[in-house]
Amino acid sequence: MMIQKSLIYKNIPINYYDSGKGNALIFLHGFLENAKMWTDYMDHFSAKYRVISLDLLGHGETGCLGYIHTMEDMADAVHAVVSQLKLKKVTLIGHSMGGYVSLAFAELYPDMVKNMVLINSTARADSPERVENRNRAIDLIKRNAPVFINMAINNLFSDSIRPLHQKAIDHTREEALKTPTQGVIAALEGMKTRIDREVLLHFAPYSIAFVLGKDDPVMPYEETREQVNGTNASITTLAGGHMLHIEQKEALLQLLTEQVKG
């Protein structure tokens, strides 16, 4: 059973869900998502593990700290939850932006990381082109946030996928539209200024596993695969796009079941 909890961190609430007993798994959502995206995964893993899913800064029911939420800011908020729960070592499972936060957490608190799974994510910093795209997104959000959010969610799914998962896509859009404008902008500002963390793929003392969608429209597959070559990180490819937790739920559950054993 998922138990909703919260703590006050730097005068804002951090909302999270806690379930099960055993080794701790921390699920971190992506941009415009929230902790509820992991509900089915928490139900699956809480039979054998302590499973925590939290709303990152400016998302879900967690407040905003400022007008820029760096990945380090978000990682420190995750650490506040981990500390409150008195967890020693955790497995980090991050989707997209949640992967960036996982890497920042691992760099800040390496002794607390058991292993890490990055889903539809990358260790690289934004390219100049991607930074410019984020700047354009911020300009649009300031003019009309709902238009941007609707467009952003639509762009995550291909035309062939939408009819197969329309209910889940509609739910994803509904949850995304609840994200406060300040939280949306602060996350974009934080993502565009994040640093490159490819060095962790070479020297981290814990395992790092990538799970990538072959047709991901957000994270170009070949570019992400390239960064893993010659490193200690592993990579698994699934047929699908950026939202593998929806498009390939059963396959991802099976993969994660294998990964968290490590």
Image (cartoon, grey):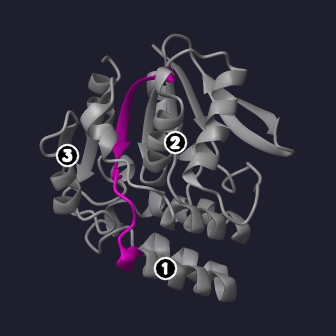
- Numbered range of the magenta stretch: 112-130
Q: Nearer the viewer, residue 92 or 51?
A: 92
Q: Amino acid at mark 3?
A: Val
The 10 Å Cα crowd at callout 1, few under 14, some 14 to 19, many 20 or more, is: few
The residue identified by callout 1 is 151
Q: Residue 168, how many percent across, how many down?
A: 46, 57
**Quarter of the rendering containing residue 86:** top right
- Circle 2 packing at 10 Å, graded few (<14), some (14-19), many (20+), is many
Q: In the depicted view, which residue is nearer to us: 220 or 201? A: 201
Going 53% across and 59% down the picture, which residue do you hit?
31
Where is the N terminus found, in terms of image quarters? top right
Q: CA distance from mark 2 to mark 1?
A: 23 Å
Residue type for callout 2:
Leu
- Up the image or down, 40 lies above or below 129; here it is above
Please tell me whether mark 3 sits on a helix, a strand or a loop.
helix
Q: Nearer the viewer, residue 79 or 54?
A: 79
Q: Residues within 10 Å of mark 3 (few under 14, many from 20)?
A: many
According to the image, label 2 marks what residue?
Answer: 28
Distance from label 3 to label 1 (Cα)? 31 Å
User: Looking at the rendered structure, which numbered label has been put on residue 228?
Assistant: 3
The amino acid sitting under disc 1 is: Met
